[in-house]
Structures are given as C-alpha cells and as structure tokens.
C-alpha cells in the first residue's frame, strides 16, 4: 500500500468500520486483507441502538485497483471489540476472539472464530460462551501463554476480560 502520499484511499460503500482487528498483505503486497467490525444501520448509532447491529467481516482490498474486491461476514452474530494474539498483529492470523454485543453494545458473551474456514462458510465459530442474565463482559484481551516462544500455537494463551453483574435497585423497597 505504498503510495506517493503515504495514503491509499479506497471507497467502500456500506462499510462503516468501527474497530480493526488485524490486517495483513497477500499476493506480494497487491492485496490487503482486513478483519474489522462494520456498523450496520449506522444512522441509528446515536439514537436507536436497538436497531444497530455489528458485523465482523473479512475485507479483501485490491491495492493497485484501489477497490474492495470481497467482503465476507465471519459470523451471524453481532460481534465487536475483537482481538487476536498480539504476536500476529500485521501478519495473517487464524483466530479471533470477540464480544457478542447486545444493542447497548454491552458484551453478552464471547466467541472464538477460526478465519481459516472456507470463505463460503458464513459462520467461522469455534466456541461460544454466553454470560447469562444481567451479566456482561467487556473487551476481551488475549495473553500468549509463552510470549517468547515463537513456535507456540497461535491460540495457546489466556483470554481475559472484565465482567459485571447489572442489576436494578428499587429505592422505595430497599431491594
């Protein structure tokens, strides 16, 4: 993506990226693959959050043609705040961990996705954990078990996230 100005602009109608999970070059630098969350129905972002949905997508960009050549959702779920093993940042990665988000953008669970699945398969889901009623988690963070071992498996580590129990308090009844 080396351009004289240092920036390569690519129009992508309908793509409203909120968070980029990872990106890497393929085809000798002619293609950039980006995994990112896309805000569906972005016009409701500040008003009707119940109508907003997050789509985690794998996006292929033709650098020379300056165009998006493919966009593939990697899950049917509404996902955001995704992470990878940080040792794979800027390199092709296989696993993504993401929060399952409800309309208020609270994390209602977490999933593990495998990007190596066929692009024809809509759901790359490997594992899913839902927290339960009124429990919410924050953005996951991946910690490699052996950060100095370059031979370790990409998913050999710990997934850490903040959790909270949401409840209402009736001040009149004291409960």
Image (cartoon, rainbow, N blue to C red):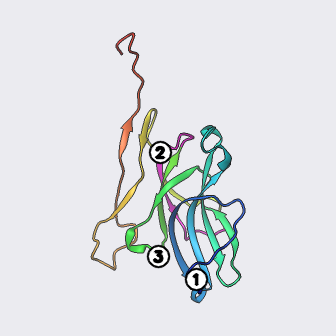
- Dots 3, 1 in contact, CB < 8 A: no
Identify the residue under disc 1.
5
Residue 171 drawn at (x, y percent): 38, 14
- Which circle's residue, 1 or 2, is located before the other in the chain? 1
Residue 80 drawn at (x, y percent): 52, 53
Give the answer, above or below, for where 104 lies relative to 121. above
Give the answer, above or below, for where 80 lies relative to 90. above
Q: Which residue lies furthest to the bottom in this view?
A: 28
Question: Considering the numbered disc 1 on the image, is that residue within a helix, a strand or a loop?
Answer: loop
Look at the image and give the residue range highlighted in magenta: 102-119
Q: If the image is split into quadrants, where does the N terminus sit?
A: bottom right
- Which circle's residue, 3 or 2, is located before the other in the chain? 3
> In the image, which disc is placed on residue 112?
none
Residue 89 drawn at (x, y percent): 43, 73
- Which circle's residue, 3 or 1, is located before the other in the chain? 1
| Closer to viewer: mark 1 or mark 2 | 1
Taking the spot 58% from the left edge, 83% from the top edge, the residue there is 5
Identify the residue under disc 2.
107
Identify the residue under disc 3.
90
How many badges with numbers are in the image?
A: 3
As measured in the structure, the alpha-carbon distance from the residue carrying label 3 to the one carrying label 2 is: 26 Å
Question: Considering the numbered disc 3 on the image, is that residue within a helix, a strand or a loop?
Answer: loop
Q: In which quarter of the image is residue 123?
A: bottom right
Nearest the viewer among 167 and 112 is 167
As measured in the structure, the alpha-carbon distance from the residue carrying label 3 to the one carrying label 1 is: 21 Å
């Amino acid at each position: 993506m080396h351009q004289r100005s240092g920036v390569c602009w690519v129009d992508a109608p309908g793509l409203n990226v909120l968070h980029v999970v990872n990106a890497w070059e393929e085809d000798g630098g002619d293609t950039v693959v980006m995994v990112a969350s896309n805000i569906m129905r972005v016009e409701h972002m500040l008003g009707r959050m119940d109508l907003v949905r997050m789509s985690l997508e794998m996006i292929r960009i033709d650098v020379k043609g300056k165009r998006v050549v493919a966009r593939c959702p990697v899950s049917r779920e509404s996902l955001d705040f995704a992470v990878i093993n940080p040792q794979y940042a800027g390199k092709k990665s296989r696993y993504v961990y993401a929060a399952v988000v409800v309309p208020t953008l609270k994390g209602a669970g977490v999933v593990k996705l495998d990007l190596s699945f066929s692009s024809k398969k809509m759901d790359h889901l490997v594992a899913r954990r839902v927290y339960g009623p009124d429990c919410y988690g924050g953005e996951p963070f991946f910690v490699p078990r052996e950060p100095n071992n370059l031979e370790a498996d990409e998913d050999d580590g710990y997934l850490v996230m903040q959790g909270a129990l949401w409840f209402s308090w009736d001040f009149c009844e004291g409960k």
